Amino acid sequence: MEAKRRWRGVLDLEAQFAFFRSQPRHPVNAAAHALLAGPILFTNLFVLHFLLLPLPLPLDPALALALAYAASYLAVDRRAGALAGQLFLGPWAASRALAARLGFALSWKLVLATQLFCRTWQFLGHGLIEKRGPTVRELPEVFLMEPFLIVLQILNKLFGYEPYPGFSKNVDKKMEELKQRKIN
C-alpha cells in the first residue's frame, strides 16, 4: 500500500514541481542539469539498442523506455507532456540510427565518455556547489520526473506556461508547506 501511494505521489505534478523548485539551485548547477539531462537520456536510449530483451517486435528496449517516459509525462500534463514526450521519441529515433551506423564497438565508448562527463558534472554540482544531492528515497522522482520538470520550468519561465489556471499559486502554497516542515 505504501509503495502504491508513493508512486501516485511521483506523478503528483504540483507536489513534484514544488519540491523541484524548493531545492536550492545554484545557477551553475541548474544550468548543468538543464544542459546535461539531454545527453544523459540520449545515451541511455542509445545503449539500450544493444540489449537483447524478449520484447515483442518491433518494440526494442529503448523504444519501451521512451514510450514509458512519454506516457508518464502525458499522464501529468497533456500539453507539456506531449512536448516532453517528443523530446524522448525524437532522440530515440536518432539514437537508433546512430547505433545502427556506429555499431557496438564504437557506441559503448561514446556512451561511456558522455555518461562520465555528464554525471561527473552533476555530482560535482550537487556535492561541491549545492552541498546536497538527492537521497535514495528521492531517486524515483529524480529519474522519472526531473527531465519533465526541467521542461516545465523552462516553459513556465519563458512563456508563463501553467498546466491549468492556479497551478503556480498551488505550487507556491506547497513550497511554503515544505519550508514550514523544514523549519519545524
Image (cartoon, rainbow, N blue to C red):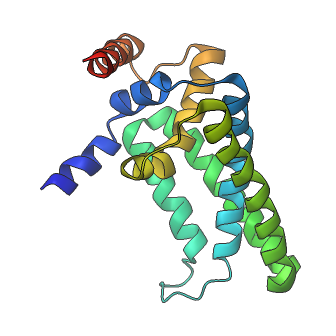
Where is residue 16? Give x, y as percent.
39, 33
Placement of 93 over or under 183, stated as above or below:
below
Q: Residue at x 66, y 17 (%)?
A: 158
Q: Residue at x 26, y 46 (%)?
A: 8
Question: In the drawing, does residue 9 fall left or right of residue 165?
Answer: left
Report the quarter where the N terminus lies: bottom left
Q: Place residue 24 in its image quadrant.
A: top right
Where is residue 110? Give x, y as percent.
83, 69
Q: Nearer the viewer, residue 20 or 65?
A: 20
Q: Nearer the viewer, residue 22 or 173?
A: 22
Count of numbered circles in the view: 0
Where is residue 80? Give x, y as percent.
52, 34
Placement of 57 over or under 14, stated as above or below:
below
Question: In the drawing, does residue 70 fall left or right of residue 5?
Answer: right
Q: Place residue 103 in its image quadrant.
A: bottom right
Q: Residue at x 82, y 70 (%)?
A: 98
Where is residue 167? Give x, y as percent.
38, 17
Question: In the drawing, does residue 41 fall left or right of residue 181?
Answer: right
Placement of 141 over or under 162, stated as above or below:
below
Placement of 180 over or under 25, stated as above or below:
above
Question: In the drawing, does residue 49 fall left or right of residue 59?
Answer: right
Report the quarter where the C terminus lies: top left
Residue that sits furthest to the left in the current view: 1
